[in-house]
Image (cartoon, grey):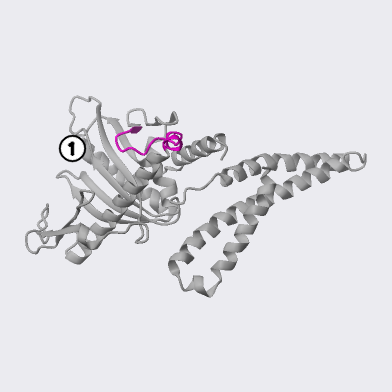
Amino acid sequence: MDLLEKLAEVEDRYDKVTREMSDPATLADMARYRELSREHSGLQQVVDACREVRELRLKSEEARALLADPELKDLALEELREAEAGLVPAEERLQALLVPRDPLDAKSVILEIRAGTGGEEAGLFAAEMLRAYTRYAEVKRWKVELLSCHETGIGGIKEVVALVKGSDVYGHLKFESGVHRVQRVPVTESGGRIHTSAITVAVLPEADEVDVDIRPDDIRVDVFRASGAGGQHVNKTESAVRLTHMPSGIVVSCQDEKSQHKNRARAMKILQARLFEQAQNEADSERSEERRTQVGSGDRSERIRTYNFPQNRVTDHRINLTLYKLGEVMEGAFDPVVDALLAHARTEALGRGS
């Protein structure tokens, strides 16, 4: 199908969604309105890109028609060069937009970071990665809310779970799931030897209530006294909450808040996301051929990236991308890495004839 033939189909859907969004019945159903609003935003980009391509093609045709006129030839050549120079990137943008969009891309995420091999050094790197992702979120104007955090004694993090809310968060962070390896000389290393440590990152799309149906009878709720460093409200009240989803065996604990109610709400949000991820993984396994063509599997045990501090180097092993900008990345400049991963995924999808 020609790109411009696709325009009529997209514009028809765009007009239909626009009308439905203004329908009183839709305005009364906020869940449906949010769903349509996300689709409308995506369609708007495609419609704008289609119209840009159509205008540039028309401009090119008109310029070609004037080439036969000696008096207008120079002007026509200039206009033709300008139109064709803009047409190639415009068509590439349109092709990228026409790749079927993952419906989860617009969602907020539950971000989980855990220290792996490397002891205290892994915990320190986990804390630095949390800071890097938080800085990236600031650039993107997303909001980060810590749901659970288990710190180590020297400023590191054993495990942290955060909610990252905003526009297209999952679409930008979904390729971060996996093992992140760090190579550097630890602060505690007196001999100057480079150590290798690792952390695990998981990015789960935030689940709405309509995404996951959790029966109250399937959850065992345990409350206990919070414990941790600092002595703040430790062992004073049973404010910590542990949720066990018995059918799946998934266990979630939260103790960071003084309120048992708030801890339970946070734990439920994490549980919903993990159950939603489990359902998505089961669906992905049924579409194994499609799953294999994606950028990485999303498996938390897959080593995806290396951060080499002595060389100021970041290497993403899935697409053989190497950048000598580690300092910038650790300050939240993830776009060069994310954009390369997204471009690779789009190219793969177009190659499959999507």
Question: From which residue to which does the magenta span run?
Answer: 288-304
**Magenta stretch containing residue 137, yes or no?**
no
Instruction: Point out the image quarter for the C terminus.
Output: top right
Residue reaching furthest left?
235
Relative image position of residue 64 (x, y in whole percent): 83, 40
Q: Is residue 351 visible?
A: yes
> In the visual, does 18 lie left or right of 117?
right
The residue shown at (55%, 44%) is 99
Which image quarter: residue 158?
top left
SS for callout 1? helix
- Residue 17 position within the rendered picture, expressed as x and y whole percent measured from the top left: 57, 62
Left or right side of 4 for 349: left
* Vertical comparison of 319 with 277: above or below: above
Q: Residues within 10 Å of mark 1 (few under 14, many from 20)?
A: many
Observer-nearest residue: 339 or 329? 339
Q: Amino acid at mark 1?
A: Glu
Location of residue 212 in the rendering, given as x and y in whole percent from the top left corner: 33, 57
Q: Which residue is mark 1?
A: 120
Identify the image quadrant of residue 89: top right
Residue 293 falls inside the magenta stretch: yes
Count of numbered labels shown in the rendering: 1
Residue under the image location 78 percent in, 41 percent down: 80
Q: Where, quadrant-wise, is the N terminus in this rendering?
A: top right
